[in-house]
Image: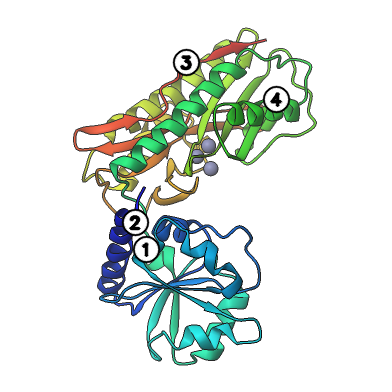
Amino acid sequence: MGRDEYERRMMRAGRAAAEAGLAGLIVTPGPDLVWLCGYRPTAVTERLTALVIEPGRAPRLLVPVLERPDAERAAGAGALTVAGWTDGADPYVELGKWLAPQGRYGVSDGMWALHLLGLQRSVPGGGYAALTEVLPMLRAVKGAYEVERLAAAGAAADAAYQDVLGVRFAGRRERDVAGDLARLLTEHGHSQVDFTVVGSGPNGANPHHEAGERVIQDGDRVVLDFGGLKDGYGSDISRTVHVGEPGAEERTVHEVVREAQQAAFEAVRPGIACQDVDRVARRVIKSAGYGEYFIHRTGHGIGVTTHEPPYLVEGEHLPLVPGMCFSIEPGIYLPERFGVRIEDIVVCTDSGGRRLNVTGRELAVVA
Ligand code: ZN
Ligand code: ZN
Ligand code: ZN
């Protein structure tokens, strides 16, 4: 992706800041910086790096002078001015010279407190707000290039799932299977593995269980939820498998979750409120009698991170827009017994949803 696309993103961010009543944005290393200008410092340290975007002005990037050559090689560097600060200088005073003394700025959610406190000291009249709160949808609508990157990450996660169906589950620890998932994601082109959930038996009833020492038994149901980054874009898929032949109730619960996931997918279209997609999934689970066991939101956005706006949750009134990419991941969690979750990444298109995970959602039997 070239300079022009980064320039467009930074200009759009400047306009969005103005519309939100902000003087501008201050972006420190992390996903927003990568997305806006393609710069990912090799090491993030206490030395300040900050991109300042103000409407109607060329964006400026302040970096430690020793990192300036690296910053100037970033893909979007041609669309901004890079300035260096030298050890011994006060970088907050340097940055403060660029800022409106009474301006209110949106700052990266992950900006270190060290830096924000430094800014508050050097620009005491300024105001600061978290970027996700003031511009939640800044990165939410993906362009065609981004959708294809997400589709490629999804295809790699699908392939990893197909492969893991062939590994041994019974008699091995959850963390051994988690290791298989990490290896498979890497083999299928991921540069970073963010999570490998293997929730076997009763552990599957805890949506936040990662993977532990429990030895998987014949007859267990196992929730798998894994993903990471491939070529800078995220994957996130959940499937629930069964070791040996499942019982009747296990089949029923799995089918309810699959229907809920399908119904929510079919509800995706431009203009529908995020919370209404959540409600569609919840209605299916509730009418099957499991409403109290669906204990989390239906989905989250995905892009250069694996969790970001938009959130498909009650209370989120924002409408879906073509290009938004998000998970649809209803689940049922029966305490002390087992859990089921099925998750695909979906993109909203003009004509409805398109799944970026296409591997089978039926109950798979593993050994
Ligand atoms: Zn997931
Ligand atoms: Zn997810
Ligand atoms: Zn999650």
Looking at numbered disc 2 in the image, what kind of residue is underneath it? Answer: Arg
Sooner in the amino-acid sequence: mark 1 or mark 2: 2
Q: Nearer the viewer, residue 107 or 254?
A: 107
Residue 47 visible? The answer is yes
Looking at numbered disc 1 in the image, what kind of residue is underneath it? Answer: Gly
Apparent side of residue 199 relative to residue 289 in the rendered image (left or right): right
Give the residue drawn at x 42%, y 38%: 327
Query: Relative to 78, does residue 19 appear above or below in the rendering?
Result: below
Sooner in the amino-acid sequence: mark 1 or mark 3: 1
Tag 4 secondary structure: helix
Q: Position of residue 229 (x, y in %)?
A: 53, 41
Apparent side of residue 196 relative to residue 59 in the rendered image (left or right): right
Residue underneath mark 2: 3
Tag 4 near tag 2, CB within 8 Å: no
Q: Position of residue 220 (x, y in %)?
A: 68, 18
Tag 1 secondary structure: helix
* Residue furthest out toward the front: 69
Apparent side of residue 283 relative to residue 189 in the rendered image (left or right): left
**Number of residues whose C-alpha sits closer than 10 Å to that of mark 3, classed few (under 14), some (14–19) or many (20 or more):** some
Tag 1 near tag 2, CB within 8 Å: yes
Say the numbered circle drawn on residue 177. 4
Q: Quadrant of residue 103 in the image?
A: bottom left
Give the residue drawn at x 61%, y 15%: 242
Say the numbered circle drawn on residue 362. 3
Residue underneath mark 1: 78
Disc 2 to disc 3, C-alpha distance? 44 Å
Give the residue drawn at x 63%, y 34%: 197
Mark 1 CB within 8 Å of ligand 2: no
Q: Nearer the viewer, mark 1 or mark 3?
A: 1
